[in-house]
C-alpha cells in the first residue's frame, strides 16, 4: 500500500505545491515518519522526487538525513545488508545526487560537496569492502569540481577535508587510501594551507595506526599527497607561517620517514631513493629536519647488510653498503650547501662510524682477525676510501663553515671520538687524519679549550681493541703538549688577573695520565705521575686567590682514587705503590 498508493501520492503533492519551505518540511516528514525498511524498498520512487523540487530547497540536508538514517539502519541490523545490495542502494543514491546537482545549476560548491560527503559516509558504513564505490564517489566530486581553481570557500574546503578524512578514519590504513585513484585528484583542489592540514591528518593517521608503508610505488603516491609539507607550493608564503608550526610540520615528516620499512634490502634501497628524491626538493628551511631521518634510516639498512660483500657491483645486488654510502654522501652534500655545517659534520661522522661497524661485522667472524687482514679487506672492497671521504668532508666543513668557537669545540670532540673508533685506515690515511685533528686542537681560540682538545687527542694513539693503535710515545707527546698549554693558561691568568688561577686543567691532565698508566703504557711511569701531583700542589700553594671548591674536590677525589688502587693489591696495587698521594 505504501509503495503503490501512499508514497506516490504524497510525492506528487510535495512536488506540485511549489513552495520551497513546504517541500523541505514535507520531505523531512516522510523521511522521519516512515520506517527504514519502507524507505529501502521504495528508494527509487522517493529519490525521483528530489530533482523536481524547487531550486531553493535545502536538498542536501534532506538527502543527507535519508542517507544517515539508512546507514544507521544497516549498522544496527547487519542482517539487512543483503537488501541494500539487492535494491542497489548505492547506485540509486549516486544517480539521484547527480541528477539533483544537474537540475540545480546554481547549487553552490559547498552544497554539492556536502552531498558527496554524505554519500561517502553512507558507502563506508554500508559497503566498507567496496573500494570501487568509494573511488566512484571521489571521482564524481572531481567531476563536479573540474574546471575550477583552488577552492576559496572555507565551508567547501572544510567539506573536502571531511571527504578525504572519512576513508582514513574508516580503514585506519593509508595504504587503502593510496589505492583510490581519485583521492589525490580531490586534494588538488585544496588551497596550499588546507593541503598542509590534510597532509598532517594523513601523517597523524599513519602514526596513530603505526602503518608500515613498504613499497616504493606506495611511498611515491604518499609523498605526492603530502607534497605541501615537503616542498614549496606555487604561490605558497612560508614566511608567514609561524616558526613553531613549521617545525612541527617538518618534525612530522621526519617521523614519517622512520615509519617506512621493508625487510627486503633491495626494496628498502628503492624506498630510500624515493624519499631522497622528494625531500631534496624541500629547500634550505626543510632539509635540516628531514635529511637526518633519511640518513639514519639508510644507516639502519647498512647495519642489516651484515655479511654482504662490499665489492658487489652492477644491478644484480643493488643494496650494497658502498651504494648506500654514496647516496648518503649526496644527501649530506645537499644539506651542506644550505649551509648547515654543524649538522652536516655530525652526519658525516655518524656515517663513518656506522661504516666501520658494518665492515667489522662483515669480517670479524673470520679467523684472521688482525689489522692487516681488516685493512686489506677494506682495500679489496674499495671501502676505505668511502670512509676517508666522509672524514674529508667533515674536515672541510670544520675549516670553511664552522666559525663559532663553541661549535668548533663540539665538532672537534666529535671528530676525535669518531676517529678513535676507526681502525680500518691504513697507516698513511690515519696519520693524515690524526695530524689534522691534533693540529685543529692546538688552534682553538681559548687556551683551556686547546688543552682539553689536545689531551683528548691522546686517545687517538692508544685503543683497547685487539687490533688497535698502541703508540705510547705519541700519547706522552700529547699529554706533555697539553701540560705546556695548561701552564701557558696559568701564566696568562697571572698577567690578566694577578693570580695563577685554577689548577683544574692540571688535575684533568693528571687523570689522563692515570688512565694511560693503568693501560700499561711504558712511557707513563709512576715518577711522571708523582711529579705532576707535586706540580699541582705547588700551583695551589702559589695561588693567592680564593681556592676553587670544584678543583679542590676534584683533586681530593683523584688522590683518594690513587689510595684505593693501592689497597686493591695485586698488579694494580704494585703499580701505584710508589706514588705518594697523601
Image (cartoon, grey):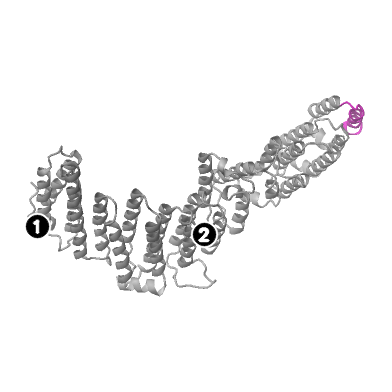
Q: Is residue 502 left or right of residue 199?
A: left
The one nearer the camera, 298 or 508, is 508
Side of 229 relative to 141 (left or right)? left
Percent of width and height locating residue 480: 18, 58
Residue 485's disc is: none
Q: Secondary structure at mark 2?
A: loop
- Residue 153, image x and y in percent? 71, 37
* The magenta stretch spans residue 13: yes
Which span of residues is magenta-colored? 1-19
Q: Residue at x 17, y 48 (%)?
A: 490
Work out whether residue 218 can be spotted: yes
Q: Residues within 10 Å of mark 1 (few under 14, many from 20)?
A: few
**Label 2 sits on residue:** 263
Q: Any mark on residue 527, and which?
A: 1
Image position of 415 (left or right of 206)? left
Q: Residue at x 71, y 41 (%)?
A: 151
* Badge 2 density bin: few <14, some 14–19, many ≥20, Cα 10 Å: few
Image spot of residue 506 (x, y percent): 17, 50
Front residue of 470/73: it is 470
Amino acid at each position: 500500500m505504501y509503495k503503490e498508493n501512499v508514497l506516490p501520492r504524497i510525492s506528487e503533492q510535495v512536488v506540485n505545491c511549489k513552495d520551497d519551505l513546504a517541500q523541505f518540511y514535507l520531505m523531512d516528514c516522510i523521511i522521519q515518519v516512515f520506517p527504514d525498511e519502507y524507505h529501502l524498498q521504495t528508494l527509487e520512487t522517493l529519490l525521483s522526487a528530489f530533482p523536481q523540487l524547487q531550486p531553493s530547497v535545502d536538498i542536501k540536508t534532506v538527502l543527507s538525513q535519508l542517507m544517515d538514517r539508512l546507514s544507521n539502519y544497516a549498522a544496527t541490523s547487519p542482517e539487512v545488508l543483503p537488501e541494500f545490495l539487492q535494491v542497489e542502494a548505492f547506485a540509486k543514491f549516486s544517480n539521484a545526487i547527480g541528477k539533483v546537482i544537474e537540475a540545480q545549476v546554481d547549487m553552490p560548491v559547498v552544497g554539492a560537496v556536502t552531498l558527496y560527503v554524505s554519500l561517502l559516509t553512507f558507502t563506508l558504513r554500508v559497503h566498507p569492502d567496496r573500494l570501487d564505490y568509494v573511488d566512484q564517489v571521489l571521482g564524481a566530486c572531481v567531476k563536479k569540481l573540474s574546471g575550477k581553481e583552488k577552492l576559496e570557500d572555507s565551508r567547501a574546503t572544510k567539506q573536502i577535508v571531511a571527504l578525504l578524512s572519512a576513508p582514513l578514519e574508516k580503514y585506519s590504513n593509508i595504504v587503502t587510501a593510496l589505492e583510490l585513484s581519485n583521492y589525490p585528484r580531490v586534494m588538488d583542489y585544496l588551497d596550499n594551507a588546507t593541503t598542509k592540514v590534510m597532509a598532517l591528518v594523513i601523517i597523524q593517521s599513519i602514526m596513530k595506526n603505526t602503518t608500515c608503508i613498504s613499497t616504493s610505488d606506495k611511498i611515491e603516491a604518499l609523498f605526492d599527497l603530502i607534497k605541501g609539507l615537503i616542498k614549496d607550493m606555487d604561490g605558497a608564503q612560508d614566511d608567514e607561517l609561524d616558526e613553531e608550526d613549521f617545525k612541527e610540520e617538518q618534525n612530522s615528516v621526519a617521523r614519517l620517514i622512520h615509519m617506512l620499512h621493508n625487510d627486503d634490502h633491495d626494496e628498502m634501497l628503492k624506498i630510500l631513493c624515493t624519499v631522497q628524491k622528494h625531500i631534496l626538493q624541500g629547500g634550505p628551511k626543510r632539509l635540516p629536519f628531514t635529511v637526518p631521518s633519511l640518513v639514519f634510516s639508510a644507516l639502519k639498512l647498512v647495519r642489516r647488510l651484515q655479511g654482504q660483500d662490499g665489492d658487489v657491483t652492477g644491478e644484480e645486488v643493488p643494496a650494497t653498503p658502498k651504494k648506500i654510502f654514496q647516496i648518503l654522501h649526496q644527501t649530506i652534500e645537499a644539506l651542506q650547501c644550505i649551509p648547515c655545517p654543524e649538522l652536516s659534520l655530525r652526519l658525516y661522522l655518524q656515517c663513518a662510524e656506522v661504516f666501520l661497524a658494518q665492515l667489522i661485522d662483515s669480517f670479524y667472524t673470520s679467523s684472521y682477525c688482525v689489522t692487516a687482514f681488516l685493512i686489506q679487506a677494506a682495500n679489496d672492497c674499495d671501502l676505505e676510501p668511502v670512509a676517508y671521504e666522509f672524514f674529508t668532508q667533515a674536515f672541510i666543513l670544520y675549516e670553511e663553515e664552522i666559525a663559532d668557537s663553541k661549535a668548533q669545540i663540539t665538532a672537534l670532540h666529535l671528530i676525535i671520538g669518531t676517529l678513535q673508533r676507526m681502525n680500518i685506515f691504513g697507516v698513511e690515511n690515519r696519520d693524515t687524519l690524526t695530524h689534522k685533528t691534533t693540529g685543529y686542537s692546538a688552534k682553538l681560540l681559548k687556551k683551556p679549550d686547546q688543552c682539553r682538545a689536545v689531551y683528548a687527542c691522546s686517545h687517538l694513539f692508544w685503543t683497547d681493541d685487539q687490533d688497535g693503535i698502541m703508540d705510547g710515545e705519541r700519547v706522552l707527546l700529547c699529554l706533555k703538549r697539553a701540560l705546556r698549554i695548561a701552564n701557558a693558561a696559568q701564566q696568562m691568568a697571572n698577567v690578566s688577573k694577578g693570580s695563577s688561577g685554577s689548577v683544574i686543567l692540571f688535575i684533568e691532565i693528571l687523570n689522563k695520565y692515570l688512565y694511560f698508566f693503568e693501560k700499561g703504557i711504558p712511557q707513563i711511569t709512576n715518577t711522571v705521575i708523582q711529579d705532576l701531583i707535586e706540580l699541582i700542589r705547588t700551583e695551589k700553594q702559589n695561588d693567592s686567590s680564593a681556592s676553587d671548591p670544584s678543583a679542590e674536590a676534584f683533586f681530593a677525589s683523584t688522590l683518594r682514587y690513587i689510595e684505593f688502587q693501592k689497597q686493591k693489591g695485586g698488579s694494580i696495587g704494585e703499580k701505584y705503590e710508589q706514588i705518594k698521594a697523601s
